[in-house]
Image (cartoon, helix red, strand yellow):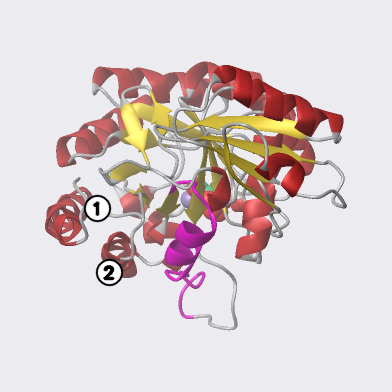
Amino acid sequence: MIVVMQEGATEQQVDAVIERMVELGFNVHRSTGVIHTVLGGVGGKDDFDLAIFEIMEGVKEAHRIISPYKLASRHFRPGGTVVHAGDVDIGGDAVVVMAGPCSVESADQIERSAEIVARAGARVIRGGAFKPRSSPYSFQGMGQEGLQLLRAAADRHGLRVVSEVMDQTQIALVAEYADILQVGARNMQNFTLLRELGRLRHPILLKRGISATIEELLLSAEYIMAGGNYDVILCERGIRTFETYTRNTMDISAIPVVKKLSHLPILADPSHGTGRRDKVAPMARAAVAAGADGLLIEVHPDPDHALSDGAQSLRPEQFEELMGQLRRIAPAVGRTI
Ligand code: PEP
Ligand code: MN
């Protein structure tokens, strides 16, 4: 359930409502907005009379939330959520571009990548140190050494870092080097991992599963938020359909759907979404036009020799050209880059 407090409700009034919610068995999550404080209650009884809350001092309205996710629902924060990763705001006016190679491969490769993406205007560098590869014989990532190289290159170029965590044993290590922890598509329903990430206070980039519905994506976000970590960034990265021309089918419509259902920021990953370098820019442009809060894009200094996902990685000059186009598209939909 959700209780929206009136503008100017006192702390005492808020506390009284929280107390009543707790009495009814709810776990209370508080969101203090610019105008209204919203109290989200999860896990309580559902056979009580809403009027109990509606007549309380300082209460504007009370609702039952029928969607299976509560904290991820737009009702919880009608004004939207801005996630802060250092000096980078995700979900605000600016479209945030996160770019870099699929994997960290060497000191030289990641340094060149950082220089390229920073110069073109990305704010965050991506790069996997732990890689979820379909085959156990493919390159699996550089592990801790990769994280160290990524962090150092990012710091030299004023970038924030996003990197993937594959299981709960890696959380502490990845959190030491990365500003944002990525949960990959294959792990979207690794509930043990999601619960552990709920205890962390780092932003989480949660990618949509390969065959996951939007509701399942939001329920996975709910797992993280139920632990008290509200800094979740969603990411549409293409889903599996009967189409084989592209690696996945980039579901652009997920962007406005998520915007309506949830307050969480949503990014688009046109690299995994299409799997083909020549299709990345059109999908990136479409995603920004559709209202994405940011992009996750694979860029490699020498994609023909990349150890993973070279075919979908942009060449440096292609990325620069795309950024120029996005700077023209964003203002048309009321955003900046
Ligand atoms: C990645 O970002 O490199 C990655 C493995 O993505 P996904 O989990 O979406 O396949
Ligand atoms: Mn990749």
Residue that label 2 marks: 282
Task: Looking at the picture, tell me which residue is in the foreground, 80 or 264.
Answer: 80
The residue positioned 42% from the left and 56% from the top of the image is: 269
Q: How far is mark 1 from mark 2, CA to CA?
A: 15 Å
Please tell me whether mark 1 or mark 2 is closer to you in this view.
2
Is residue 314 among what the camera can see? yes
Task: Looking at the picture, tell me which residue is in the foreground, 291 or 267.
Answer: 291
The residue positioned 56% from the left and 68% from the top of the image is: 239
- How many labels were placed on the picture? 2
Q: Main secondary structure of the magenta part?
A: loop
Residue 250 spot, x, y in % from top left: 45, 69
The residue positioned 53% from the left and 51% from the top of the image is: 74
Residue 305 spot, x, y in % from top left: 36, 49
Residue 284 spot, x, y in % from top left: 31, 61
Say which label, 1 or 2, has the lower sequence index. Answer: 2
First to last magenta residue range: 245-265
